[in-house]
Image (tube, rainbow, N blue to C red):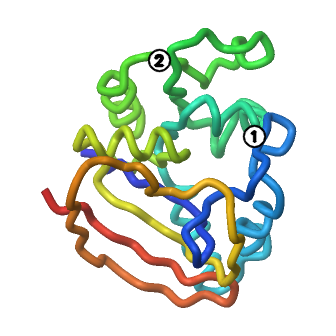
Amino acid sequence: MAATVLYMSMSLDGFVAGPNESLENGLGDGGERLHSWFSNAEGPDREVVDESLTTGSVLAGRGTFEPAGGWGGDHHDGIAIFILSRHRPAPEFAQWPNVTYLGDLEEAVRRARDAAGSRNVLVHGVGTAQRCLRAGLLDEIQISLVPVLLGEGRRLFEHLGVGHVELETVRVIQGRDATHLRYRIRR
């Protein structure tokens, strides 16, 4: 069965976006720095990029998807994209055949896993990751730790409210521009 894996770049001080996030400034002020390793990836960094692009579907929240321009309707390789939202898609996103908006978390995860087949589900977004973690629907966390201190912005695990969560280290890869930490969630 497909595993749900959160892929996230994070600053050393725990931020996944800078301050002043908006639809036009989706990563907040300075937030692009968190993804610079991805676009210039080589060696070990490239391994992590390539792995993320072998996933069989994407599960994300509207607040991640829409500021990213919906990835043009294709995150990678024409895979299915499931957007967790209680609202109908904005007109510019409504006509893309690979994109499905769903209001129910369990249904969204089930459909993303079904679409992924034997491959993993790539989970994007703070809210979606937290909801999946609280519901016991997140299997692994892949953090690409970027050597920068943003000072403020959006934290990945702030106000999580699930109590104590044990993680098992799966691997640590030292890249040129990020340290890639992979954990399995213990249940």
* Residue appearing at x 51%, y 40% in the figure: 58
Image quarter (top left, top right, bottom left or bottom right) of the C terminus:
bottom left
Residue drawn at the location 60% of the way across and 64% of the way down = 15
User: Position of 116 compared to 11: left or right?
Assistant: left
Residue holding disc 2: 102
Q: Residue furthest left?
A: 187
Please provide percent x and percent y for residue 70. 72, 33
> Mark 1: which amino acid?
Ala
Q: Amino acid at mark 2?
A: Leu
Eyeballing the image, is 110 above or below 116?
A: above
Q: Which residue is mark 1?
A: 68
Residue occupying the point 55% across, 58% down:
155
The circle drawn on residue 34 is none
Q: Secondary structure at mark 2?
A: strand
Q: Nearer the viewer, residue 56 or 6?
A: 6
Of 116 and 63, nearer the camera is 63
On screen, residue 84 versus residue 175, left or right, reads left
Residue 176, horizontal then vertical, whole percent: 67, 90
Q: Earlier in the sequence, mark 1 or mark 2?
A: 1
Is residue 180 shown above or below 82? below
Estimate the x, y position of residue 109 in percent, counting from the top left: 35, 32
**Label 1 packing within 10 angstroms: few (<14), some (14-19), many (20+):** some
Decide: is 15 above or below 88. Answer: below
Residue 75 image offset from top left, x and y in percent: 66, 42
Q: Identify the image quadrant of the N terminus.
A: top left
Give the vertical position of 177 relative to 121 (above or below).
Answer: below
Which of the two residues, 153 or 53, is positioned nearer the viewer here? Answer: 153
Helix, strand or loop for disc 1: loop
**Is 128 or 43 nearer to us in this picture?**
128
Residue plotted at (22% across, 43% down): 136
Image-quadrant location for residue 113: top left
Q: CA distance from mark 1 to mark 2?
A: 18 Å
